[in-house]
Amino acid sequence: MSEAIRELTSELLVDGATPLEPVISPDGRWVAYTVTTRGATGEPRLRSLWVAPVSTGSPPRRLTDGTARAHSPRWMPDSASIVFLSDGQLHQIGLDGGGAETLTSWGPGISGHVPLADGRTVAIVAPDELDATDERRQAERDDAIVWGERAPVDRLRLLPPGSREPAVVGGIAGRHVVSVAQRPDGGPLAVISWDCPEDEPGAFTARLHMVDPDTGKARDLGPAGLEASSPAWWSAGGRWHVAYLAMTPPGPVGGTAVFDVAVPAADDQPVGDGTPEHRNLTEGMTVCPVELQQVTGGPPLALFAEGLDTALYRLDPDTQRFRRVSGWPGGADSLTASAAGDLVAVLASTAYQPADVHAGPPGGQLRRLSDTRPELRQVRLGTQERLAYTASDGLALDGLLILPPGRGREDGPFPLITLVHGGPYSRFADAFGHWWEPRQLLAAGGYAVFLPNPRGSSGHGHEFAVTVAGAVGTDEWTDILSGIDLLIADGIADPDRLGIGGWSHGGFMAAWAVGQTGRFRAAFMGAGISDWGMQVGVGELGTQEAGLGGGCGWEGPGPHRHDELSPISYASKIRTPVLILHGENDTNVPVGQAVYFQRALARFGVDHQLVIYPREGHGISERNHQLDVLRRIGAWFGRWLDNPS
């Protein structure tokens, strides 16, 4: 570490460049990726397209100037050029970076794209252009929204060489397309689609199709399950298969699984209703698949969350089970593989290093290709320690502890802030963390920071994850308390100076915590749910929320299970000061959840502050708002924890 030691600041957390979307070239020689940089205040972050050689050690090169939002890079099959999206249109650029060619001028914009094996055609996912009626209604503001009618469906289209007008593929023309992958030999497309573009009920109507790109004819391969994504072709014994990711049935709460369909041959005789079986290839595993990657020259690869770490697995065609290839400490995502499958690239992060692009052989050491946050190597960071402990019922749990910079366990007890992750199907990996989980920033303020992975988290298999179905805030809450009590018993945490907070599901857990106990001196609730019944009615995935909260509210006059699990029901017991933070345009957890909780706290005279961020959704994106979030959280805990009397 450099001698010029700096203290971590809010500005350092939010202003740095971030690498995203690595894609390795089919020949394995290059990795393309995007880098986000901060625009002017109030503007969205910009993205530039970069390319790095995998093996020569030469530095990465920027292909676009960073004045737009380049994203979603995809290699053409010859590895000589990249197609990407910017300003809603498809562009193509060569490795020399000599200027990008615009390939489309599609009015509504392009949602997704997949270059096909012929090296000339690109499969496009895009909504229809406005017709005369749409234009008239738009001009005259005759725009009443009839739910379920005239929604902008993303259709599958093909963009032939030399044309700027993609043509719709007729076989599934009426369905909303969410994922596409072509068979590696240049054959049909595997397509996942919904009945409609709305998350509710669209996400619950996913189906898998096989589409001939030449004729447009489609074959329905059956329902694909909630949150179906990432179709990947592979073959064994002369039979093609399609694997994909989806929620483990019966859902809608639990772990993700890899499912597989043996694609019927043209001369196969239908059995039963003609729908092929969808088999769970990860059933019984105590790790969680998070990404699936098609490999042209072999079976699929997959990233699995393994507790606090991440591992690479490969499907064994003979046993049709995933076998571990290698593992990496901390977090990794955005898996991509060369055509032969002999090289992979990921975004990898460790406890003290933010995510960067790494590449190498699947079973060997990965080399870092990008270096987007060198300034953080000069920053004093607190020690990040792995925790392993047991719940009150004996269940094995894990988490992380971060101590103030330059301090050790022997210097305790410290004021302790517990941060709870979102999801609940998510986790804290032994990685650097994102700006909205300011573990190191709080540690720099003199706090010990506890990051638990209670039941319901990913990384320990479906059975561990599904335990929160209809039971949020119960056993997962006591799991968190067990960790806090352990840190108190070990002399690390001061029992009189405890704080708690989190975003999304973590915000719910913070609101739940202060209604269950008076042990916390301060809390922050970021974009959290205060009432599960309300969330079913107004959230993006009401049915899934009902699976967490235990009911819908329309089953009868009650009492309802979701009332037992809603923080609002315990507002009269709250004495802990609460900072409530929420985006004004949040459609995932609408801002009414925050207002409802604030009104209850005001009714019972609880110290609180409600902060609403204009233009923001479920995540906070504008620089000034991000800085405000971090500064308010620090000031809130400083006000209530630094002076325990």
Image (cartoon, helix red, strand yellow):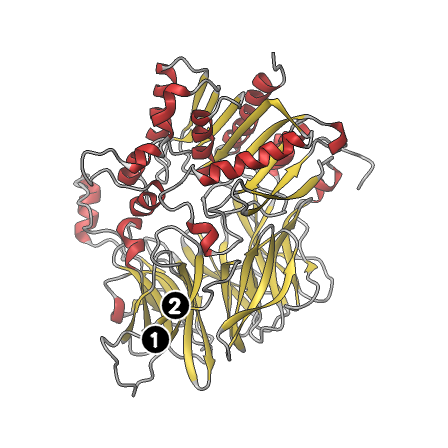
Instruction: Name the residue beneath numbered marker 2.
Output: 123
Residue 68's disc is none
- Along the line of sight, which residue is nearer the eye, 294 or 47? 294
- Along the line of sight, which residue is nearer the eye, 77 or 435? 435
Circle count: 2
Picture residue at 62% right of the left edge, 41% below the top: 400
Quarter of the N terminus within the rendering: top right
Picture residue at 43% right of the left edge, 20% below the top: 574
The image quarter in which residue 575 lies: top left
Residue 130 % position (x, y): 24, 53
Pick whichever of labels 2 and 1 is earlier in the sequence: 2
Residue 404 % position (x, y): 70, 31
Dot 2 amino acid type: Ala
Q: Are marks 2 and 1 in contact (CB under 8 Å)?
A: yes
Dot 1 amino acid type: Pro
Q: Residues within 10 Å of mark 2 (few under 14, many from 20)?
A: many
Residue 444 drawn above or below residue 301: above
Looking at the image, can residue 566 be seen? yes
Looking at the image, can residue 420 be seen? no
Residue 213's disc is 1
